[in-house]
Amino acid sequence: MLNLAAGFIAIICAAGGNLVSASWIILVAMILDFLDGFAARLLKAYSALGKELDSLSDVVSFGVAPALIMYMMLYGLEPVIFPGLSAYRDILVTIIIFIPVLMPVCAALRLAKFNLDPSQATSFSGLPTPAGALAVISVVIAGHYSEYSLIESFVSSPMALGIYTIVISLLMVSNIPMLSLKIKGLAIKGNEGRYLLAGLVLLSLIIFGISAALLIIPLYIVASFVSRLF
């Protein structure tokens, strides 16, 4: 429920144009979501109500909130969208601005499939919704705090952001096996992929600083594939 409350606050911030604060609040929602699941596994406190409430909260915090952030980013770039195609500009602007609608739709579909699929208890099929949200807020955070020209170019490109949103959304409803971050113990065996991901992210942060936020999801995908080798 705290996850849900944080998601709602993030929506308010995003609607007001404060995308950086909205992104940090979504990160707080992720931490609360992780702690909720960790506490449930630690205390063996499972319930059908908790399962449904968790998914309903995730739709808001990791579906609607990041989609609104991406919409606001694209809306802010509206003056530079397809400047040379004036005859079709209004249509193209409308299409690219409403691309983020895919994100909450795919997030809801992914969560519904998750609730009905018992095989996803130890591994995920498709990109988890928190990871999809992280992919969005990493763009905002890296773009705000980083001085790399490549990141600035990416954040200021409507085409790049539109394609990025489509890819993230489709990954959520894909059947690609993804690493589960549910921790049941600290032993290396069985957690190879998780330790690999933690090491890669830490190394990236040391080398690139806050700009490494953009690398977290690609590294997660790499760790997911590598973990299947163990």
Image (cartoon, grey):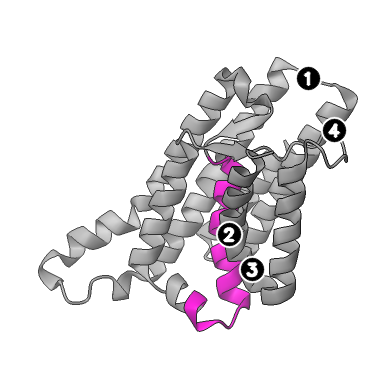
Secondary structure beneath dot 2 equals helix
Secondary structure beneath dot 1 equals loop
Residue 212 against residue 191 in the figure, above or below: below
**Where in the figure is residue 16, as x and y percent of width and height?**
53, 62
The residue wearing badge 1 is 46
Amino acid type at image mark 1: Tyr
Q: Are marks 3 and 4 in contact (CB under 8 Å)?
A: no
Amino acid type at image mark 3: Ala
Question: How many residues crowd mark 1 within 10 Å: few (<14), some (14–19), many (20+)?
Answer: few
Point out the frontmost of discs 2 and 3: 3
- State yes or no: residue 150 in magenta: yes
Residue stretch in magenta: 127-151
Question: How many residues crowd mark 4 within 10 Å: few (<14), some (14–19), many (20+)?
Answer: few
At 69% from the left and 38% from the top, the residue drawn is 230
At 62% from the left and 46% from the top, the residue drawn is 226
The residue wearing badge 3 is 212
- State yes or no: residue 60 in magenta: no
**Where in the figure is residue 80, as x and y percent of width and height?**
30, 75
Q: Main secondary structure of the magenta part?
A: helix
Q: CA distance from mark 3 to mark 4?
A: 29 Å
Point out the frontmost of discs 3 and 1: 3
N-terminal of the two: label 1 or label 2? 1
Image mark count? 4
Residue 12 in sight in this render: no
Amino acid type at image mark 4: Ala
Point out the frontmost of discs 3 and 4: 3
N-terminal of the two: label 4 or label 1? 4
N-terminal of the two: label 2 or label 3? 2
At 54% from the left and 65% from the top, the residue drawn is 139
The residue wearing badge 2 is 137
